C-alpha cells in the first residue's frame, strides 16, 4: 500500500495504562497514523503524559510525546491541537469503564477500535482479526450512531484462532481443546505480584476460559445482514499464568469433520495469506502463521518477536489418540494479541475506506 | 507402625546424581533405613562422597555422609563396612546404564527399588505407587532371580495417577487428557540451561508424553499370576517445561463410564486412604490427595511441600464441554515423584515382609 | 531453657499483612507463645482471619487460626477471649500507621516488639539483634509508659550486622561498604510487580540505603543510662532488588583499625555465640554465623533456610585492594530479617524477665 | 561514513558457539562486512552451519547462512568460496583454544579481532574499546607477523570503562570499587544450569574479578612506541551472577584526584563523543553514555537494548561517604560487551585504514 499524503490523526483512550503505552510505542513511527490526543482518567487529565504515566515499555519515551497534555475521555475534550476530532480512537481502557465511555463517544461521532471486552458481543460490533474475518468489518455500517465501535478479541483467543482459521476454512473443525501458559504482561500493569509468579504457576485467570470458549465462535462466524451467525464448534479451555514476560503458549487439540493429513495441515498454515497481506497493510506480517519442525519450538523467548510480534508460531503437530491432532501455538500477547492487532484492524478499516 | 529394633542397611546407586542426592537427603533421618553404601560410576568410585559430588540440595550435607567412600555399582563392591550386602538398594541411576546394572545386581541377589525407567514394563516387575496398586508388589515373587527389581513410575505419571485412582476405582474413567507444566528439577542436573528456561517455556520433554500415556495403564491394571493386565483407558498427554524449580502442574480432563457428580468426586479424593496410610508407613502422607476450593490453587510454590512433599494437591474441578470434568493436579516431582515415592515403595515392601 | 508451665498469650498487630502472616506461621507451634489476638485495620476488623487475609505463606493456614475474628489495633479491643490484655504484642504494622498506634498502645500498658521502623531511633527504644546487643534491652526500663516498645532492625541491616559483630568486638571495624541483592519478599505484599522484576534488576529500594547506613551505629553502640551511644563507623550502602523470592545477599567490604588475619576472622565467625545461644532460646540458631569455604557459596536458594532461617551464611572472604577484606553474607529476610528475628527478641525479653 | 563500493569479506572463528552466533546475527545486514567463512572445531567442520549449530538466538537463522559449510580454524581452510583469505576474522573462540589458533592465524597473515581473553595482555596487542582508546589501534603496526591480533575486553569491563572514561580524562579517577549483577548469557552456552540460577544468586564468576581489576589499567593507559603504559588506578571488584538473561548491572564507587561536582560529572557523560561517533561508524551509538534521572533506572529489561544494545546506561549518581560518588551502570553484555563491541573495533580498523 502506498504512502498516504497526510497522516491520519488518532487518539488513544486509556493512554497511561499498559495497553495504552503499547499503542503509543507502536504508533510512534507509524506510516499512516499520528498520535494527536492522549486521553485517560480524571486523575491524569491535565498532566503532561510523562508525569501521568509510569512508563513501563522497554523503549525510551520520546520527548514530544512525554510533553503532550493528557485529556479526559469525553467528547468535548477529545480534540486535536487544532480543535478537531481525531479521525480514529484506539481504546486501551479498562473493562470497568470502557463500556460506557465507548458508547458515548460512538454516539458523539467518534470511530473507535477497542481492545476492551465490553462491546465484543454487541450485535453490530465486529470482533476482528484482520486475517480471519476481514468481511465482518462491514457490520459497522449497521451501527445506529454517527461513530463506530470495532473490537479486538482477547489476547489468548487471537493466537489460537489465527492457527485454526486456515484449517477450519479447508477442513472444518468440530472440536477444539486448549490449555494455555500465558505471560504475565497479559494481566496488565501492575498485574500479578512478583512474589506470586516467580518460581510458580497460577492455574487460573479470571474469565479467560470463557473468552476463549466463546469469542472464536463469533470471529469464525458468517457475516449476514442480521449480524454474525456464529460457527458451531465445541471449545474447552484451561488457562494458566506462567513466569514469562511476553508470549502466550497454547497446547491445542482439534477434531475435524474429515481428518486431513499432516502435510495438508502444514501446507494450509504455510500458504495462509489473507487480505492484510494482499493489501500490504503496514503492520501485516508477511506470513501470519509460521510452522517450525524442530521438536522444541516454538518458544516464547525465541519466537514471540517474529515478524515484529505480528506473526503466530506453530509447532509439534502430531497425531492425538483422543482428538485428531495436537500442536502448540505461540503469539505475542501485547503486540499481536492486543495493541498491534488493534492497529492492524485500523489499517484494514482505512484500506477498506471505512474510516 | 512401630519402631524397628534395628535399622535396615541400604545402598544408593547413582548416589552422586540429583536423584541420588535426594535419596541421601530424605534417608538421613529415616526411622527404618540407614545409608550404608554409596555407589556411583567408575569416575566417582574411590573418592569421598563430598568430593565426588556437586551437592545441589538445599540442606547441608552432613559430615559423616560426606566422608563415606563411593564404591562401584558391582555386586562385589556393594558391601557395607561389615562386608555384607545391604538389604536394599535404591537406584537413582541414569537410564543409559540402569538397565544392565540393575539386572546384574538382581541376579546377584540384591533387592532394588529403582527410579529408572528401564525395567518398568518387565513382565514381573511391579510399577508401584503404594497408595494405588499395593497388591502389585506380590509380582516380585515371580521374578526368577535371587534378588528383585521394583520400579517407581515417571514423576509426571505419579501425580496424575494418584488423583485418578480414587475416581477410577469408584466411577471408572474411560478417557484422560493431560497437559503439563513441569519443573526444571524433573530433568535432572544440570538439566535445562538457565538461558533456555528463564522467561521461557519449552513445549517438549523427550519421551515424557509416551510415559504418561502408557505407565498408568500398568499401574491401574489388575494383578494376575501372569503379570499385570493393563487397564483400558485412552490417554493423551502434552508435556511442557516451565521456569519453576520444583512441582509439576497438570491440567487434566476426564471422561467416565458413568459421570458422577462434582460432590462425589471431591468426596472420593477427600476420603482416599490406602495401605500406606492404614499401615502408617513413615513416609506416607496422612491424606494422599488434598482438594482446594480456592480458584487460584493449587500452585507449585505454595503447595509442593504439603505433607513433606508426599501429598498431591488438586483444585479447580469444573465441568468440561468436551470431557466430563477438568481439574488441576500438583505434585512435588523430586519427592513424591521420585526419591520420596521410591522410599515409600521400600517402606511398603518392608511392611509387607518382602524385604 | 526449660518448658514454660503456661504459654504466654500474644497478639499480632497487622496480622493480615505479609509480616503479620509470617508471625502467625512461625508462632503456630511456638513452645512459649500462643496466638491469642489477631489485629489489623478497620477494613479487616470483625471478619474471620481466613476471610480478611489473602494467605500467601507456603504452608496451610490452620483452621483454628482461620476462624479467629480479627480485631482493631486499639487498647480497648486488643483483648484475649478471656477479656485480658495479651502479655505481648508483635507488630507487623505498616510504617504509615505503626508510629502512632504503637505509641498509644505502649501508653495503655501494652508491651510491643515491633518490626516497623517508626520508633527505631527513639531515645529509650532498643533496636535489637539478640546476639549482637542483648544488653540494650534494659533501655525499656527508662521508657515513661506503663508498657514498652522494642524494635527489630531493617532486614538488610540484620544480616550484615550479625556478620560484623564478632569482628567488630575483637578487631574494631572502621569502615563498611555494602552492595546488596535483595529478595522481593522484602518489599512486603504485593510488592514489586512480576512485570518489573522477572528478567530484571531494580537498582533502588526506597530509604533502604539510609537504614543500612544508620541502624548499625545504634545496634553496635554502647548502652548507657542516657540511651545508646552510637559507635563510630563509616558505612556506605547500595541496595538492589533482584528476582529472588527469599534471601538477601550482601557484598561487604571492611576496613579494621588493626587488620587481623583471614584465619582470625573465620575463627571469630565460627566461634561466635551469644546470649540467645547460652540461654538456649527456642528460636536461637545453634551457630548464628556459618562460614562456607566453597567459592560459589552461600546462595539464597541453598542456604536461606539454614537453622530454620535464623542463621546467617558467610563466604568468599578474601583480601581487598581498597579495604582490608571483602566477603559475602546471606540471610533470610522474612525469618531472621523480620518475623523470626522479632520473635527471638521476645524470647530474650522473656528469658531476661522483662515481660 | 559513506557506503563502501564492495563489502569486506569476513570469517567467524568459533561460529557455532554463543558469541559466534551473535556475530552471525549482528553481521547479517552489516553495511560493510559480509560473512564469507564460518569456522569452528573439528567436530563441526564439514557440516552445514544449521546442522552444526544449536541456534539459540531470538531471531530466525537465514537459510543462506544455514546452508554454508563450516570449516576448520586452520590457515589452509579459512578461505572464501573464491579461494581467498577473508580480509578479517572475528574470533568467538573459547579461551581454551583461542590462544594458539589466533597466534597461528596471525602468523599466516590473517587479521583477527578477538573476543577471547588470551592475547589481551600481549605487549603489542591493543585491548580496544573504540570510544575509549582509539589511538591504541596503532599498536598492531608493531606486531611482527604479517597478520594482526586485536582484542575486545571482558563484557563486565566494557560497561564500566565506558562510564569511567569521560570522568577519568577530565577529573582523574584514583580508586574504583565495583560490585556486579551479571546476566547469565555472559557465561556462554549452556552456561549456568536453570536449577542453579532460578530464584538464586551465585556470588562467584571464575576469574571475572581479576579481569575487571586489570583490564581497565591497560585500556585507560597511554600509547607509547614501547606498548601501553598502564594507568595507575586502584580497582576492587566483586562479581555476581543473577537470574537475568541479558544486561550486566554494576554498582560503582569512585574517588577522584580532585572531586568534581555532580553536574560536572553528568555533563561529562552527556557530552561524551569519541572517534566512532565522529567517524559515524555503522555500529556506533549516537551517545555512548546515557544518564537517567529516575531513581529506579537503569534496569536490564528496560535499557539493555538502548541504541541497539551499543550504548551504556548510567543512573543514581549520588555522594558517597567513603568514596566521592556512587552510581549504577548497565550495558548489554553480548552486544556492547562482546560481539557488537568487537564489530565496532573492526569498523574502527577499517575507518583508520588498518584493514
Image (cartoon, coloured by chain):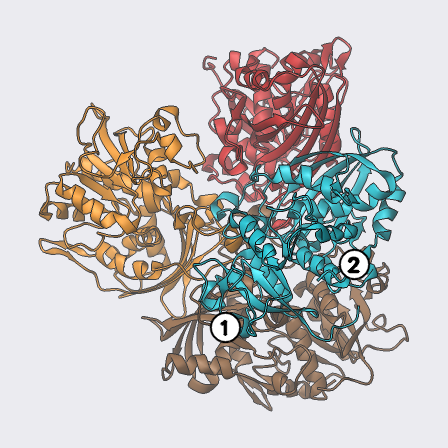
Chain colours: A red, B cyan, C brown, D orange
Left or right of B271 on screen, residue A297: left
Left or right of C17 on screen, residue A340: left
In this rendered view, identify the residue nearer to me: A119 or D354: D354
Q: Say if B291 sits above or below A68 in the image.
A: below
Q: Which residue matches tag 1?
A: B67
x and y percentages locating residue D170 in the rendered image: 25, 56
Left or right of D317 on screen, residue D213: left
Which quadrant would residue D342 be assigned to in this image? top left
Q: Residues within 10 Å of mark 2 (few under 14, many from 20)?
A: many
In this rendered view, identify the residue nearer to me: B198 or B113: B113
Which quadrant would residue A171 be assigned to in this image? top right
Which quadrant would residue C174 be assigned to in this image? bottom left
x and y percentages locating residue D11 in the rendered image: 25, 34
Name the secondary structure under disc 2.
helix
x and y percentages locating residue C226 in the rendered image: 59, 89
Q: Which residue matches tag 2?
A: B276
Left or right of D71 on screen, residue C37: right
Q: Quadrant of the N terminus of chain B?
A: bottom right
Find the residue positioned furthest to the top: A225
In this orientation, does residue A137 appear?
no
x and y percentages locating residue A153 in the rendered image: 67, 26
Amino acid at each position: 500500500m502506498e504512502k498516504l499524503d497526510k497522516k491520519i490523526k488518532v487518539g488513544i483512550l486509556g493512554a497511561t495504562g499498559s495497553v495504552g503505552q503499547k499503542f503509543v510505542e507502536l504508533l510512534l513511527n507509524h506510516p499512516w497514523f499520528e498520535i494527536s490526543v492522549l486521553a485517560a482518567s480524571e486523575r491524569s487529565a491535565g498532566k503532561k503524559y510523562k508525569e501521568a504515566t509510569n512508563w513501563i515499555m522497554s523503549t525510551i519515551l520520546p520527548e514530544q510525546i512525554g510533553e503532550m497534555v493528557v485529556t479526559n475521555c469525553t467528547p468535548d475534550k477529545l480534540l486535536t491541537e487544532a480543535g478537531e476530532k481525531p479521525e480514529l480512537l484506539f481504546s486501551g481502557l479498562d473493562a470497568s469503564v470502557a463500556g460506557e465511555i465507548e458508547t458515548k463517544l460512538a454516539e458523539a461521532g467518534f470511530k473507535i477500535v477497542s481492545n476492551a471486552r465490553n462491546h465484543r458481543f454487541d450485535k453490530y460490533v465486529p470482533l476482528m482479526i484482520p486475517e480471519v474475518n476481514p468481511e465482518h468489518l462491514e457490520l459497522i455500517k449497521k451501527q445506529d450512531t454517527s461513530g463506530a465501535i470495532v473490537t479486538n478479541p482477547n489476547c489468548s483467543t487471537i493466537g489460537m484462532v489465527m492457527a485454526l482459521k486456515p484449517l477450519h476454512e479447508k477442513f472444518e473443525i468440530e472440536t477444539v481443546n486448549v490449555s494455555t501458559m500465558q505471560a504475565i504482561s497479559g494481566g496488565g500493569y501492575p498485574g500479578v505480584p512478583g512474589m506470586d509468579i516467580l518460581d510458580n504457576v497460577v492455574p487460573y485467570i479470571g474469565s479467560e476460559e470463557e473468552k476463549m470458549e466463546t469469542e472464536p465462535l463469533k470471529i469464525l462466524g458468517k457475516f449476514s445482514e442480521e449480524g454474525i451467525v456464529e460457527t458451531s464448534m465445541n471449545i474447552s479451555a484451561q488457562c494458566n499464568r506462567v513466569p514469562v514476560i511476553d508470549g502466550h503458549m497454547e497446547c491445542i487439540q482439534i477434531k475435524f469433520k474429515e481428518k486431513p493429513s499432516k502435510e495438508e495441515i502444514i501446507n494450509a498454515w504455510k500458504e495462509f495469506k489473507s487480505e492484510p497481506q494482499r493489501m500490504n497493510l503496514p503492520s501485516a506480517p508477511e506470513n501470519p502463521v509460521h510452522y517450525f519442525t524442530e521438536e522444541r519450538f516454538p518458544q516464547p523467548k525465541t519466537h514471540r518477536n517474529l515478524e515484529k510480534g505480528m506473526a503466530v508460531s506453530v509447532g509439534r503437530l502430531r497425531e492425538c489418540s483422543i482428538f485428531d491432532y495436537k500442536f502448540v501455538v505461540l503469539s505475542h500477547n501485547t503486540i499481536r494479541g492486543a495493541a498491534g492487532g488493534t492497529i492492524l484492524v485500523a489499517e484494514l478499516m482505512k484500506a477498506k475506506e471505512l474510516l
